[in-house]
Amino acid sequence: MKVLYRNNIVQRMGGEFGFDFLVVTYCENILDDESLDHFYGNFDLNTLTCLQKELLLITFLEPYQETEPRKKRVSFRNDMMGLDRSIFPILEEHFVAALDDCFVTGLDYELCKAYFAELRPVFKECTTVSKYRSNIVERMGGEATFDLLVVSYCERLKGDIKLHRFFESYNLHNMTHLQKDLILMVLLQPSAENNVESIERRVTSKYSPMFALGLNEHHFEMMERHFSAALFECLSRPVVIQICLKLFSNLISFFEEHALSSVEFDDDDDDDDDADDEVEDDDDYDEVEDGDDKEDETLIVSTRSLQIGSKASRISYNEGVQSHIAKRISQALDASDRTEQTEQNESLESKGVRSSEFESERISSRATPEKNAKGRQNFEFISPLASENKTKRRTTIGFSTSSLVTPKKLNGKPKMAFGWRSPAFKRMKRSAMAQ
């Protein structure tokens, strides 16, 4: 007997091969979901593919294609496995993800989603209503996954330096209980059994010291970022992560309300203190008012005198520094002259020339500029400090070279007047050797 599908949906997605590929992808998504391990953890891929294909054929086949016997078998199996309608949204999400993975688009995509939605009556009604909104804890994997999420979130809060002063008195164990109560305020269903009001009172009493220290909605934004990072670390399904973030963001009203009340309370105390200070200031104002003008005038005069005195002291200090530098430079030049003269005298005495004759010639060359121009090399030193003061300090350092290097003609031949080749030097050398 030929199998007929509704609206030829299987033929439109590629035939039996395309439909089988869709079912296998759907089953792989189920096996990757840790929250469904309690129901499908013992199934391998082939067995789970057969079970889920039979489930899909209930609505994909034409109504007269023996769907009722198949529907009864699937319902009985679901009852035995403990599957109810709280699990159906999870399976629906995995099926939609499989359609995206298999590139089913357009009208075929909408038809497949509508056919799967018709499978809801196959799952029995929930015998126990979940105490969490949107079955969020069950969808994330149960209480164990939720506890892991809270611990990861608390570790991030403890590591934040900006939030350290609010939670420094809590260890990780106490911090976990505190943050878990805070999160349960928005995750639990508002019913009498869950006793959300008592949890809110307990959280308010624990957070009141933190609000007194300045905890506000800006710090809540930091906490929300840490919670988001913990969600992406512990959970894998984007839909569950978005639901958790949406529920957690509802806590902003709690922070705004209590942070505002603490600020108003502090403002009232500050206003009372300001009022007392104003009364005391009014009593003393009349007594001090007359003396304020005189003190202001005295303060102005003393300030101007200090400014003038500081300027004069700076000028005198600069002049003293300049004179000291000039004195040191002159001393250095004199010492240089004395050292040079001593060296020249020693060298001349070793050569047999009297120092008095050389000194007289040196002094005469200093006194007469004409001789300097002919036979003396002059070196002029101008002090930088003197140049700044528009005066030049001239120091002439030099020696006469007329008797040493000036060539003269003796017997028609150029001879050195004095030197190691001159006759006088040779005679002096012979006499020294004879001695």
Image: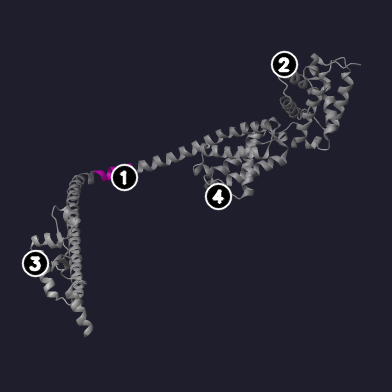
Neighbours of disc 2 within 10 Å: few (<14), some (14-19), many (20+)? few
Whether the residues at callouts 1 and 3 have beta carbons within 8 Å, the answer is no
**Residue identified by numbered label 3:** 364
Whether the residues at callouts 3 and 4 have beta carbons within 8 Å, the answer is no
The magenta-colored residue range is 278-285
Residue 43 in which image quadrant: top right
Neighbours of disc 1 within 10 Å: few (<14), some (14-19), many (20+)? few
Location of residue 426 in the rendering, given as x and y in whole percent from the top left corner: 20, 76
Neighbours of disc 3 within 10 Å: few (<14), some (14-19), many (20+)? some
| Quarter that holds the N terminus | top right
Location of residue 294 in the rendering, given as x and y in whole percent from the top left corner: 18, 47
Identify which residue, 225 or 133, lies in the foreground.
Answer: 225
Q: Which mark is on residue 107?
A: 2
Helix, strand or loop for disc 3 = helix
**First-in-chain label (4 vs 2):** 2
- In space, the residues marked 1 and 2 are separated at their CA atoms by 82 Å
Location of residue 429 in the rendering, given as x and y in whole percent from the top left corner: 21, 79
Q: From the viewer's perspective, is the residue at label 3 or at label 2 nearer?
A: 3
Q: Main secondary structure of the magenta part?
A: helix
**First-in-chain label (1 vs 2):** 2
Whether the residues at callouts 4 and 1 have beta carbons within 8 Å, the answer is no
**Residue identified by numbered label 4:** 168
Helix, strand or loop for disc 1 = helix
Does 44 appear above or below 99?
below
Residue 85 in which image quadrant: top right
